[in-house]
Each structure stands twice: as structure tokens, then as C-alpha cells.
Image (cartoon, helix red, strand yellow):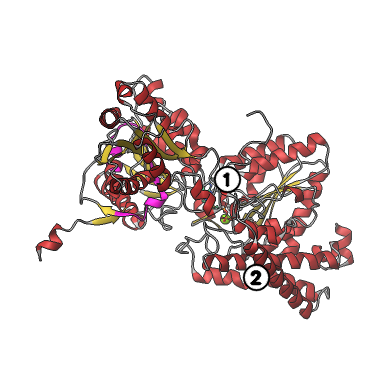
Amino acid sequence: MADTLVETNAPYAIRTYSPEQLKDALRKMFLIRKFEEGAEDSYMRGLIHGTMHLSIGQEASAVGSCMSLTDADKITSTHRGHGHCVAKNADLGKMFAEFFGKETGYCKGRGGSMHIADPSKGNLGANGIVGGGLPIAVGAALSAKRLGTGAVTICFFGDGANNEGAFHESLNMAAVWKLPVVFVCENNKYGMSTSTARSTAVKNIAERAAAYSMPGVTVDGNDFSAVTEAVDAAVARARAGEGPSLVENLTYRWRGHSKSDRNRYRTKEEISEWMERDPIVAMSNLLVAHKILSEAEVAGLEEQATQVIKDAIEFAAASPDPRIEDATRDVYTEGAAA
Amino acid sequence: MNAMTKTELRELSYAEAIREAMDIALASDERVVLMGEDIGVYGGAFQVTGDLVEKYGTDRVMDTPISELGGAGVAVGAALTGLKPIFEFQFSDFAALAMEQIVNQAAKVRYMLGGSVSVPLVMRFPAGSGTGAAAQHSQSIEAWLGHVPGLKVLQPSTPEDAKGMLLAALEDPDPVMIFEHKILYKMKGHVPEGYYTTPIGKAAIRRPGKDLTIVATSMMVHKAMAAAETLAAEGIDAEVIDLRTVRPMDRETVLASVRKTGRLVCVYEGVKTLGVGAEVSAMVAESDAFDFLDAPIVRLGGAECPIPYNPELEKAVVPQVPDILDAARNLAKGRI
Ligand SMILES: Cc1ncc(C[n+]2csc(CCOP(=O)(O)OP(=O)(O)O)c2C)c(N)n1
Ligand SMILES: [Mg+2]
């Protein structure tokens, strides 16, 4: 690591990834943004029922964390999981179809926004239960270790989730059994309306790693390269059999917690300050500064993403609804003892 | 000013009625504290606590971290030692995370300690389907808790009862679990002013009738009432009983009705198998009322699956008015 620093002052991501990979990362960040704007718009137009949790403003954390993963590696995600899905190579049409409750959706219309999963790409799914994914990630890491697959699991969770018992139990087991799992905390300052200052006894959630004898680092979660550098190191450590790590990405959600949020617990100034620190603008600037993309090419990527989302929405809207008779399908495995 | 305004009944929404009960309790009893996630400045996920934090401060309207097991346990410990907590779960589904403290501690501690302590604890659970929130945010789990001796389990269906039962729960020395259907929160109805209680363990006859008995809970009471109106127009006179309390169940009201009508339909939103209707049916089958039955008992409950996201599927997996009509018509015509 020290050697490379001597060679160049370029940020880690620029030094480590090819122009194609970096371009793809920015493309995914645009896709996440446009997906969620499209979802929000569809919701406003009454095309989607239920609620949704948007991660606009957090795109660098999702995409940056998954840079060194392959489809064989696993992730567990959260209620705020659209970004993780896209980062793990999900199909946008199937995501929108799930949003619209269609049979062509990832969960065949049974799950909706909060349950999108794509096991074929190693995405074990979003979760409606805060902290629900933490022990599951540890289980996936246990499988990888026992079966010798070499796969690493990234466990995404929020700052709010770090106060669930499941968080503490999971970190402890992962450490005791030296499992290949990386806990990525997306600290966006609030669990719903409750700030970490009011809910959490430590200043940085990464400090909690010490209690479970694992490395813990806090990084600027809106800085793509900083996220990548920290998570890649943790993934490499996990792959090398050295056990779990905790990475805390400091970020911010621009939108309310969900559709019922009146934003009474934070100020307009705070929101606009963070909007100034748009991770997509920062990533675009980084790639332009290092001559990986021109401004026109950045605009082209954004344009492309807009079109992909438009097509995805059209696909979803034209897809069939599930059949009522199939409501109780898939509760149990077909053909198993009744 | 004029007699009209005076006699007009005051209406509140179900959520406002609950808030009023909590307001009365907070004002009149220092020991009462509210605990839950985002019940302070956010006002609660369903705006039930609303602005109470402004009136009583954060020492009495306490936002907990997202820690259901710990939070519920703190409420149990506080109840054991002099406070009267009202603990709000953000969704009833999250009771699953706190089952240890509810089932192994709150429900049993009095018994285990030979009656030397009590746990005057109230827990509130926003429950039920119909909001598009899918499998982990839509369940009706009253039967899970109804299975536990030591707990009392309520399902008020009207604003008036929501207030009265919460105040009754606060007078009760034992842990009381109140399931509030999310779809009811915005429903308006008459709510008396001031302090009153609605008895725990007493069903309400919402509509007297002679041809058949519909025993319903929570949201299903309203569907049963709508069905009963249609049935009346067809000459079928249904008696609608709002069970109100799942544990302890009002045996007498149900049996008396069945003795009168000879026909019974149970309607509840929880999964049909091993649900509230199973208990109601067994209660009738084990009693002398069984001899009065002219037809088999019919249960209408939730389908044997989690609540799906797609809105049409979501509707299809819980009983709806047409299902109640079908069942009632068949029963009345002796087609079962
Ligand atoms: C066990 C459980 N408790 C409460 C909730 C309701 N809830 C959903 S998201 C959320 C806030 C989570 O905060 P955080 O973990 O910081 O994630 P963020 O929403 O900020 O992304 C809450 C309280 C839930 N879904 N599950
Ligand atoms: Mg958060």
C-alpha cells in the first residue's frame, strides 16, 4: 500500500480500478438515483401502494462497498435497499415490476420494495425488520467458510440497527468464529427521527468493533474512493480468512424516512448542506478530473440511466398481475410432505 | 347556543381517542410514562402519540433506540418497580423481537414469584393488513399472545372502545396487550369526554339479530356490520358480536347468542388455523350451546400464507364483506 502511495497521489479508487470499472460504478450510481426518482414519481401518481424508503444521497456507499465483490459473494440489505440491489447487478425492470406488485417482479409481486432480493447475484435480500439481516449475513459467512467457497458477505445495516440485540450478537459470533463477513453501517445520522446522538452511546458506531475484537473504521460515505478503500481492505481481510470487520460510511438521506415523514427532527439547513455534498456529483468530478470521462460522457451516462429507468417502468406497467389463486403458492416447497 | 350543537355527539378518530386516553393518564398519574420508537417529535409512525411530547416532555414521552427486546424489558422492569409504562410497538410484527420479555417475563413473573409482584404494563400494537406493507408489517398476531396465560389481549374496534379500553388497561394490575388495527386509526366515531373505562373481557353486541351470530374482531367487526345490513335487506337478521377481548374471552355473550340463533360465523383477520375463531368455535362446541346449533360453525380467517404485497392479493387473503355474505347466506339457507 505504501508503495502505491509513493507512485501517485491519485485517490485509491483511481489507482485500483480500470476506467471501465469506474465508469460502470458511476453508471450504477445514476441508475440508483433515477430508479428512486422514478419510484417516487410513480408513488405520487398512485401507481405504487405501500411505502418506500429512498436512499437518494447514499449512492456512493452502496456502489463503493460492492466494488470488489463478484456474483458469488453475498450481501444482506435493509429496508433502504434499492441501491444495494443495483450495486449487486440487479435487473431494473424486475425491480420496478416488484414495486408495481407484478408477477414479473423479483418476488413475483409478493414482497414489494422492502423485500427485493436476487439470490442469483448473491443478493440475499432487503429486510423489513431493522437488524434482521445481520445474523443472516453471519450465517452466509458460516456457509462460505464450512463449504470453502471463498465467498465474502457484506452486511449492510443502518445506524439505527446498531442498537438491536441482533447487531451485538452477530458481531460477536462473527468474531468468535472468524467468519468472512464485512459489516457495513450506513450511518445517515438518523434512525427514522432519532439521531445517533439520542440513541447511541458511542460517537462513532465503528467504535463498537472494539468490543468484538475486530477492526472498525469510519469513512466519508459520500466519497466513493474512501468507501471503496475501506471496504475493499475489509473484504480482502475476510477473504484471507482473517475474520470480520466493521466499516461505517457516514452519509445522509435526502428524502424523509418514508412517505409519512414530516421532517420535524432535522433542519432544512442540514438537508441542504448535505445536498451540497452529492456523492454523484463528487464521483463525476473525480472521474472528469482524472480524465476517465469527459463532462459530455458523464451527461451521456445520466441520460442512459434515465432511459433504462423509463424502459423498466414500461416493462413493469405492461407486466401481468399475479393470479389470486396463487396467493398461497410458495409458502412451502412444492412436493414436500404436506 | 342552540340545542342542536349541544346534543351533537363529539367525534374523534380512533388515533385521537387513544391519544386522549394517554393524555388523561399522563395528566392524572405521575407514574405513567410512554415509551416507544419515534413517539416523540415524530409523533409515532401512525401519529397516535402526536404532540404529547410537547405537553409532557421527553422524560415522560420517551423515544427508545430501535431496541424492541431491550425496550420491552425496560418497560417490564419499570412496571415491576412503580412505574406504569405504555409501550408502543411501531408495528405489531416487531413484537416478535420482544417475545422473550413479553412471554417469558411480563406474563409469568407474577405467577413464578407466587403472586408477590405484579406487572402493570400496557403494550400497544398497530396491527393488520391493508396498507401495502407486506409480510413483515401486516400481521394479526393476537392469537400468539392470546395463547399466553398471564397476558390480557384486547382488540378495540371503535374510537370509544379504544379510549375506554386503554384506560381500563391502565387500571389493570397485570400486563395488557392492545391490538389496534392500522386501518381504524383514521376512522371517526363518538367518543365520550373525560374519564371512563370500557370493561376488559366483555364483548359488545353491535347489532342484535335472531337468524345467525357473527362473532368478529377488530376491523372485521366493521365488515360484519356492512354484511349484516345487506343481509337484513334480504330478510336475514344477523347478530353481530364484537369480541373486543381475545383473552379473557366473553363466553357468556357468545354462548347466549348462539343459543338464540343456532348459527355461528367467526370472522377474524389472523391466520384461520389455530386462530381466535378456533377458540370461539371450540368454546361453543364444548358447551350446551352446541345443542342449539342448526348448522356447522363457519370460520372465516386469514389465508394460510404471509400477507402479500400486491394489493389484489392482499385483499384476497383476508376475509372481505362478500365472503361474510356468502357464508351467512349459505348458513341461513341451510346450505352447509
Ligand atoms: C425491528 C424493527 N423495528 C422498527 C422498525 C421500523 N423502522 C423501519 S426503518 C427504521 C429506522 C431504521 O434506521 P436505520 O437503521 O438508521 O436505517 P435508515 O432508515 O436510516 O436507513 C425503523 C425504526 C422495523 N422495520 N423493524
Ligand atoms: Mg439511519
Residue labelled with disc 1: A325
Q: Which residue appears at 80% of the width and 44% of the height?
A: A151
In the structure shown, which secondary structural element does the residue marked by tag 2 occupy?
A: loop
Q: Which residue appears at 79% of the width and 76% of the height?
A: A289
Foreground residue among A141 and A99: A99
Boundaries of the magenta span: B166-188
Q: Chain of mark 2?
A: A
Q: Position of residue B27 (x, y in %)?
A: 26, 49
Q: Quadrant of residue B74?
A: top left
Q: Mark 2 or mark 1, which has the lower sequence index?
A: 2
Residue B316 falls left or right of residue A208:
left
Label ID, residue A278: 2
Q: Position of residue A18 (x, y in %)?
A: 86, 65
Residue A170 falls left or right of residue A49:
right
Q: Are marks 2 and 1 in contact (CB under 8 Å)?
A: no
Which amino acid type is marked by label 2?
A: Asp
Residue A139 in sight from this viewpoint = yes
Indicate which label's residue lies in the foreground, 2 or 1: 1
Foreground residue among B16 and B223: B223
